[in-house]
Amino acid sequence: MNTDSFALRHIGPRRSDLPEMLKKVGVESLEQLVFETIPDDIRLKKDLKLDTALSEQEYLEHINELAAKNKLFKTYIGLGYHATHLPPVIQRNILENPGWYTAYTPYQAEIAQGRLEALLNFQTMVADLTGMELANASLLDEATAAAEAMTLLFSLRDRNQKKNDVNKFFISEEVLPQTLSVLKTRAIPIGIELVIGKHEDFDFSEEYFGVLLQYPGRTGRVYDFKGFIENANSQNIKVAVAADILSLVLLESPGHFGADVVVGSTQRFGIPLGYGGPHAAFFATKDEYKRNIPGRIIGVSKDMDGNPALRMALQTREQHIKRDRATSNICTAQVLLAVMAGMYAVYHGPEGLKHIANKVHNATATLANALEEIGLYQVNETYFDTIAVKTDATKIKYLAEGKQLNFYYPDTETVSISLNETTTLKELNKIVSVFAEATNTEAKKITEIITGKAIPEAAARKTEFLTNEVFNRYHSETELMRYIKKLERKDLALNHSMISLGSCTMKLNAAAEMLPLSDP
Amino acid sequence: MNTDSFALRHIGPRRSDLPEMLKKVGVESLEQLVFETIPDDIRLKKDLKLDTALSEQEYLEHINELAAKNKLFKTYIGLGYHATHLPPVIQRNILENPGWYTAYTPYQAEIAQGRLEALLNFQTMVADLTGMELANASLLDEATAAAEAMTLLFSLRDRNQKKNDVNKFFISEEVLPQTLSVLKTRAIPIGIELVIGKHEDFDFSEEYFGVLLQYPGRTGRVYDFKGFIENANSQNIKVAVAADILSLVLLESPGHFGADVVVGSTQRFGIPLGYGGPHAAFFATKDEYKRNIPGRIIGVSKDMDGNPALRMALQTREQHIKRDRATSNICTAQVLLAVMAGMYAVYHGPEGLKHIANKVHNATATLANALEEIGLYQVNETYFDTIAVKTDATKIKYLAEGKQLNFYYPDTETVSISLNETTTLKELNKIVSVFAEATNTEAKKITEIITGKAIPEAAARKTEFLTNEVFNRYHSETELMRYIKKLERKDLALNHSMISLGSCTMKLNAAAEMLPLSDP
Amino acid sequence: MHPFVPVEQAEGYQQVLKKLEKQLTEITGFAATSLQPNSGAQGEFAGLMVIRKYHESRGDHHRNICLIPSSAHGTNPASAVMAGMKVVVTKANEDGNIDVDDLREKAEKYKDNLSALMVTYPSTHGVYESAIREITKIIHENGGQVYMDGANMNAQVALTNPGAIGADVCHLNLHKTFAIPHGGGGPGVGPICLAKQLVPFLPKNPLIDTGGKDGINAISAAPWGSSLVCLISYAYITMLGENGLKKSTQYAILNANYIKERLKGYYETLYTGERGRAAHEMILDCRPFKEHGIEVVDIAKRLMDYGFHAPTVSFPVAGTVMVEPTESESKEELDRFCDAMISIRKEIDEASKDEPDNPLKNAPHTQAMLTSDTWDLPYTRKQAAFPLPYIQENKFWPTVRRVDDAYGDRNLICTCDPIEAYMEA
Amino acid sequence: MHPFVPVEQAEGYQQVLKKLEKQLTEITGFAATSLQPNSGAQGEFAGLMVIRKYHESRGDHHRNICLIPSSAHGTNPASAVMAGMKVVVTKANEDGNIDVDDLREKAEKYKDNLSALMVTYPSTHGVYESAIREITKIIHENGGQVYMDGANMNAQVALTNPGAIGADVCHLNLHKTFAIPHGGGGPGVGPICLAKQLVPFLPKNPLIDTGGKDGINAISAAPWGSSLVCLISYAYITMLGENGLKKSTQYAILNANYIKERLKGYYETLYTGERGRAAHEMILDCRPFKEHGIEVVDIAKRLMDYGFHAPTVSFPVAGTVMVEPTESESKEELDRFCDAMISIRKEIDEASKDEPDNPLKNAPHTQAMLTSDTWDLPYTRKQAAFPLPYIQENKFWPTVRRVDDAYGDRNLICTCDPIEAYMEA
Ligand SMILES: Cc1ncc(COP(=O)(O)O)c(C=O)c1O
Ligand SMILES: Cc1ncc(COP(=O)(O)O)c(C=O)c1O
């Protein structure tokens, strides 16, 4: 028995089981079975050209060597991706736990109440923070969520709009570039015309069926959208808002202002950046649009005995029923990440999230202030976590990379810096030192965080959120660990028994494959 | 709520619970409670001088920085410690699983059948490989296990020996240096006289009550102890053997030759070296000495319904009953490590272990051969995994460290090299290159592993081992993962509920504290 | 690591992603791969958009007909519509295979506007259709491109591939065939692999240089989609190698056929290949049990009492289950599952339309029921929860009884309000 | 990393170990620490060997009397004997505290041969004895050294310390106070911390330079014992800091006293400090329940039905349980535990000697019993397994009924032979 062979571990039947199995099937050998199964004219006659297999240990060494080649600069690029702290209790008990990660989509609700509850928490968190009536259990990323918002609004056009082929969709120039790109991909084939511009200049013409705003904007600015949304509503133009989930802790919710859809990413709720993903996007909307929501929604129902029980709601909307009448094709979503982001909110609760959001905002204000002190001005009068400094961006880029810092450079004279919950005083000083060096000034060492005041009063959050008990109970690690365990125990996953789902290939997810994910 | 504070997570009650709790206790404040509890004359009046607390994230960064300071040379020192592959499935599902690591000693058997079964596997594995009738559920390390063997044999002296104060214990000079040191510590206070020498020269005089042999020896040599043990037995001198667990796969078991006690370490069954520990040592002996075994033994019994049930056997022997009549003080042992080592045997089974042991032995033979080809001779005529090369050790040490290799240098002209299951062809070539450089010769690249023949026929294993079903079923990862899960589900640990054991302080074992253990 | 850092900083990731693309390209027998799509469905959309762009690049702006066999997964037509195509459904013959004559007729009928065929291989019926090369040839002859849905790729790896069957582009579900755990419903990765003529159209990213020289706009936000979990598939392929991958596919087929044979006489396999073999999965017909009043959902729920998650229910054929054991399951586990299915079959035989108070209709049985002081069902507690001996060893309890879907849909509550609030609704 | 590599190669480990030694030295109020012992008991032996060597270094080879209070843990006398000492037990007074007069008398009696006192603080009775400084003074005046057993250190950290009480050496159980998980019975780490005069005698290692200049031989094989898990304690101290450690100790005391108050009237706390407070744990007297035929083991087993692991049973006082909640438990969890204990107390009141067929005597109740078709106990299934509402939410099942210890000891089987083999025995 060659213990170095991963195939030995991955494949279930032992060699000694083979004779009996072949006999039952009625063949002499595996080769005969393949011969009888796969048509001759498509059977490969040559071996694939792949490297010799590595053992598990060789692979782990190899991947560690590769990991060492990544240069882990501190990165303040923002644009929807922010460094975050994954709470170790969530890492250990969810991300590193096959009881959570090997489970299937909770179609069989009776053996999935644990993750259904975790997803309900996620939906509640999103609904609370966005101020909407309901949210789904995740979409693939913010950009596709925005595209889904666009197509939802398109399909919600009223009879008149449809008759008049109202097909223009306005996109604020504050929308993130990658979102814009995906919107283009998605708009063209179904005949939506995109118009991009400043939302302040938007004319609310009846050629438009919808609008997408970004909150805060790509530049970092925080707008008061109240008036805009009211105007749009009165013109029968529906409004989608792409929002930063953490900023919503301090900003009034788009729902409060009347938005029709709010989308965004929950990455910065504890999910590793992972060089792009996976992260769970959210999609929240009004109750009246519930039958049009893309993706899966968890809902409360009751069981045969009348006890409350969770399950995926409105399954009749799924594509395998609707097929070419479906408005969205989303099937597999980002459940594991949604579970984790939801737990992040459970662990921190409203008070913890306020602490974090304020920390980010205050650090940003402190940075703006320090730059001002060395004579540099940033142009965002309002902001949550992002400032934009007008200066020689090429020079800054050169110096910043020398100090292992990444900023975002939208053009040659702008440096955009987005801070996050991991930013420390030490880092702030390092950032300032880059600018000081570039401008040949002497920077005073920052020793204290000041209180930020860059959120316009009209946009400051006044509504409560996360008032449900689940967000106010599990703030100690022991409590959260047991809560996670309690949910896990309700769910059947691959670490209990076979899940023989046709067309789903629920095979072994080997530990050696998973271990490197703990060090992203 | 300061989410950066680890104390917030570690401590259970929320701040908001405090008033009610204080009221129930009848004090105004925590300070008052402390004041009423701790005598004034011993209450500290000053704060401890400790560094400011780090947050979980700061700590993880800090410990990663420290880890980077360790220089991870390939190490062939041996002496009872060998690099090994921890199977990822065991790492993920046991070492990284609070369901296993937060459990208590299985005193409450009815909610501990999972780890009791895992420990029974460990005992069975040890008994099988050592050829003894029974084994305990681990001791602290090989050196203390050897000391326990010595004191057991001391207390087993017959009436005559006791009367004549027979107090000499013979220790083969092949015994590991650290074992010898611990034996000295333990022998002196209880009046045992140690005599060290070659076992070939031992005179079997009646002044001795016992002997300790090492198998294979410190130098790497494999002796045929059959005659020695028979002689000793006939002189009423009892024999303990410290044995390498992996070598026993290829070597006939000491039990087969009549040894009274066999001890050793199970570290090389998948346990990280960890700069010294923790690792589980084993202690195996004859049925007739069962009431004198140090430490805990798991035994099979039955429950109220007559169904088989496991529990710790012979608990009446424990120190809190025997107190100053106890022969050993061992209490906490190495259960988690014993569970892991036992699972290593379950996963690999007898065939897998043979593969591994042969791999190690063959690599050693290949190395010996390659060194011979460049004109260097090693002096061990027999060996399992260790060869001893006579050459300028100082020079080799210098060159080897330059290539990030550690050997063992017992004296200035001997280089001792112990190979292990992680040794690859590439490594063998690197080792040879050091010697080639030192001796100014050109080494031919080793491209093939030869079959080792350095185990004397008389000592070659003929007896079977690990024939029980449990060692022949769980060789695929899916099966082992589910078996581990099945056992885990039987056990109550801290991730389910409070374990309020007085004098045991079962507090939170925080994930941030545990995460760095995955990268030893 | 942030997705928009300069690529030089991400050398480790870049090496993994490039290598994984190469591996997948080799496995599919194609020319290139894009890892951007974050799910199988997104891969479908991406693939179709690439086909669309390909036609446009040749001036064929009008090609917008997408043929889709009736047995296709619902995401296929949905994706086609999203890509601006018109779906034309082709028929299945009585063996469940694509009706080649019907397909040819439609391909020829829409010849001028034919954009693509979407085909799953082996079919969603669990069969390696032997006409597949003929089918792809027909499409090509009529100016179309062939999109292969890779959900069943676990039946192909190292034994055949999309290139060999004559496809032009396919997606892979790395979260199925290539060992990314399902995560309770994601993450997924749905890369598209494609033939030479389509390479120029691979999706781009507005901030990072990637994709074809004439690439379509972004499919998802990040240049390489969900890079982190791509490590898993990379590990899978790297540790198995050609030999291990081939063996895995062989065992996947063996395990499926073993189940099929063990269940023979209890459950009929609806469709098989020409020589009577299943592919890596099989559809078991449960429709005959209606005469006992038993629906497929009853079997699915009853399996929970036996400690098993149900196979796929009513897809692609209503009233059936589709079983795919994969290569990772041991003979013991397959046997336990078969024992459960056979035991259920006996329960079905004992059930009757007139007496719905049977273990199937009442399934699943919860701990609360089983430990209750009252028991007034017409069968024993043992029959309810421990019908086979192995269950006792490691019982898994459903935590609620059968859930009422319709009730929840009528009274939609999607946030965690206090329990009382639910109950008033 | 191998324990015998040149120390320069292990700089990361060395920094952690050195720093941890410093932290523990500061916390204990001593002068130095050795991490070599791998468990508390090994720490005891190490500490006593150091004391022995200290006496020898002063020519006091004859000092071999070790005073040990009657309430001491069994490892204390066992370790003393291993260290070649003679154990003299000192009495407790009626409050459970060390009888100072008896102690003084014995210390003076053995004045010339007195080696050490082993004392646990707070005592194993869960009390901060107020005479502790007087006690340590008596020992010193009679030429002895004071060994403090650190098992209860969780009641001291940052509020008092072994130095302050006048001890000379102590062990710590890092697997108790300093967050190393218990691992089901290990690993442990039992460092010894000691005062200036004992520093020269710290244990050495034959291969690596460590320990005191006049150090005793090795206590365990590796120079720094179980270095890997020392990381855990290092993390614990480093992340809590002075403030967090102090708060932890305060909450440990609060949690214990909260339980004590909640259980008042149901279970009497056997011993308390002068002002009626428990330390971080308390002993609850269960002996009065004998009159209902209930032994402490029945309570322990019954707690399993409530989802709890029993507290320490019959140590240090037979017929009692010793409860230590620690600071990590939330008020909710303490309340659940107290509710369980109170509910059990009511069950005890209903039990009688003449009717052993009660929920306590039959505890724990298994799933097999509860789901069986027959139930012939004189109480309901609900009373058996779900006596309080919270249990239903997250039931934990003991997998076997009460185990027969005596039977197994008479028929000792310690390897996994086939089940049938067991049953014949
Ligand atoms: C045949 C088939 N095609 C496509 C898909 C969609 O893949 P995904 O769920 O990754 O979007 C599935 C998923 O179940 C499938 O079975
Ligand atoms: C008071 C006391 N002393 C000593 C010990 C022994 O410690 P260890 O189990 O680590 O050897 C214990 C352990 O329970 C204890 O409670």
Image (spheres, coloured by chain):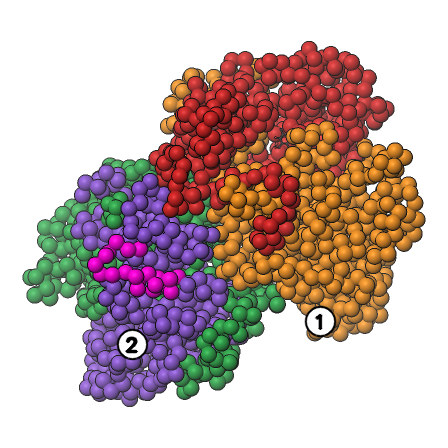
Chain colours: A green, B orange, C purple, D red
| Viewer-side residue, C2 vs D76 | D76
Q: Does dot 1 land on a helix, a strand or a loop?
A: loop
Question: Image point 38% across, 51% down: which residue?
Answer: C382
Quarter of image, res B170: top right
Point out residue C165 in the picture as x, y percentages from the top left corner: 38, 82
Residue at which label 2 appears: C118
Q: Where is residue B279 in the image (x, y as percent from the top left)?
A: 65, 47
Residue C97 shows in this picture: yes
Amino acid type, callout 1: Ile
Highlighted range, magenta? C340-359
The reply to whether discs 1 and 2 touch (Cβ–Cβ < 8 Å) is no
* Quarter of image, ligand 2: top right
| Residue C295 painted magenta | no
- Residue situated in front as seen by the camera: A183 or A159: A159
Task: Name the element at disc 2.
Answer: strand
Whole-percent x and y of residue D361? 48, 32
Specify whether tag 2 is near ligand 1 (CB below 8 Å).
Answer: no
Which mark is on residue A81? none
Q: How crowded is mark 2: few (under 14 residues within 10 Å), some or many (20 or more)?
A: many
Q: Is ligand 2 less than 8 Å from the beta carbon at label 1?
A: no
Asked if C284 appears above or below D236 in the picture, the reply is below
Where D51 falls versus A276 (above or below)?
above
From the top left corner, tell me how far across and down residue D82 is, in percent: 76, 32
Subunit bearing disc 2: C
| Foreground of the two, D260 or C164 | D260
Residue at which label 1 appears = B449
